[in-house]
Amino acid sequence: MNQIRRSVSLAIAAAGLALSATAFASGPAAAPTGAYKVDPAHSAAFFEVGHLGGVSRFMGRFNDISGDLVVDAPEKSKISVTIKTDSVDTKVEALDKHLKSPDFFNAVQFPTMTFTSTAVKFEANGEGSIGGNLSLHGVTKPVTFKLKQVGSGKGMKGEQRVGYVATATIKRTDFGMNYGVPGAATDEVDLRINIEGVKQ
Amino acid sequence: MPETSFFLPLLLQSAVVPFGVAFAVLVACRAARLDAPASLLAVVVGFLSSYFATMHAQWSPVPKVALDWLPWIALVSAGAALGVQRIPGAAGRMAVRAIVSLVFGGLIVSGAIDSLGVQKAVLAALAIGLVLALLWALSSRPARGAATRPLLLMVVAGGSGLALMLDSSQSLGQLSGALAMTLAACTLFALPRVGTDFGAAAGAAAVLVLGSLLATAHLYSGFPLGYVALLAGALLVDPALGAVRRGPSGGGLPWIPAAVLTAIPVLVTVALAVKAMQETGY
């Protein structure tokens, strides 16, 4: 009897371990393939920079983001995103005004910044990278973002949704944004783009 | 230890460099007995030295951003201000002023066409051109007192610089401050003891550069139109006083009423900019 109990306990423990291992080893559920549109209400772009040469880390966001995604095999997947530079939002109106001026984003002359992918790499665990061209302040440079799929599922109206986070670090001087480097703000800027796509 | 000195480069770029370069140009011209173009050269070379000290890393000789036009505007202003004096008739001079000013307006607005749309951009270019032409024409009238004109321009440029730095664009504020410092050097040299003439061409170039800076600030940095109007109004005080009180200055200190009346709208602008900044907590 004791031997049977011991065997059953061992079997249950082994099954539990196997399930846990599977859970840790697998990534988020694969998103259904197809064309998606960026949901502007649930997507945003963030930047983080060293203020005053590195005294603190300062964050801001861009509220107006739009774009399209194609979710498929890596060689067929692509993304293009457009962000309106005058949607910069730091909670402080005067700072937003300064960031929109020719000192930084020059939003009147360059009303949008865009990213268009050229190469996508994606692992089974939902992580990878996305290379493409970032156009900012009138300059276009290749940039590679680290990509992570957050999840995939149904929205409130039954529509298919997928979420990604893309991160990269750029140098603003590469894009002609030289003013105040490094005394006002550092050259290196961390970018983070949170995207939720709605299947079309 | 993080680098926190932001103000020392700003002081060097916007005050020490333009004043030092303008002063050196005036000394060199005096030594070479080139009094006529001395102040014009000091204003333009001093301004350009500060521009390149501040913006050298991002300037493109083929303009890509709005501020890239400013050195060209400064150089053409110098040439046009000198050239227009050689035109015999008043109508001809006004026509040249109008054409050059409208070209400046078009260059300043060119970077904003996508945002404004063609119709608004054309109207903006016309408005900028007309205001620049008017300021240029009025700045050509003789001032009361040898050092009055550079002093008053210095007050307006300096106040513009402060207001710009507080309100919208630090780079444009620095450049306006730099122009003020070149004019400070010219004021010292225009004093009776030194007597270097601050000619109409120097005044015209300074007005065109300052007007272009303010127009650029309004279009690209949201510098309020009310502030631009107050500062442009300050530039009109001396010519207006000159038109009202014709005849010899009659001794005394002829520059005092003009200086006081010029300073009032400048101080109002700076005070408004300070108040606005305090309210936002920036």
Image (cartoon, helix red, strand yellow):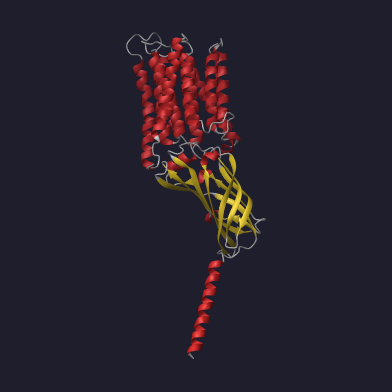
Side of B109 where B234 appears, left or right:
left
Q: Position of residue A181 (x, y in %)?
A: 46, 38
Q: Position of residue B213 (x, y in %)?
A: 48, 28
Q: Camera-side residue: B4 or B235?
A: B4
Query: In the figure, B120 relative to B260: above or below?
Result: below
Q: Camera-side residue: A188 or A103?
A: A188
Residue B240 at least partly seen: no
Q: Quadrant of residue B232?
A: top left
Instruction: Kindly give the residue lying farthest to the front in the view shown.
Output: A3
* Residue name at image x 44 percent, y 34 percent: B170
Looking at the rendered image, the quarter that the N terminus of chain B falls into is: top left
Looking at the rendered image, the quarter that the C terminus of chain B falls into is: top left
Query: In the figure, A193 relative to B96: above or below?
Result: below
Q: Position of residue B278 (x, y in %)?
A: 36, 40
Residue A182 at least partly seen: yes
Q: Camera-side residue: B63 or B231?
A: B63
Q: Quadrant of residue B126?
A: top right
Count of numbered tags: 0
Instruction: Kindly give the residue lying farthest to the left in the view shown.
Output: B252
Q: Position of residue B98 (x, y in %)?
A: 56, 21
Q: Camera-side residue: B232 or A123?
A: A123
Side of A146 where A49 appears, left or right:
left
Query: In the figure, A52 relative to B238: above or below?
Result: below
Instruction: Kindly give the residue lying farthest to the right in the view shown.
Output: A76
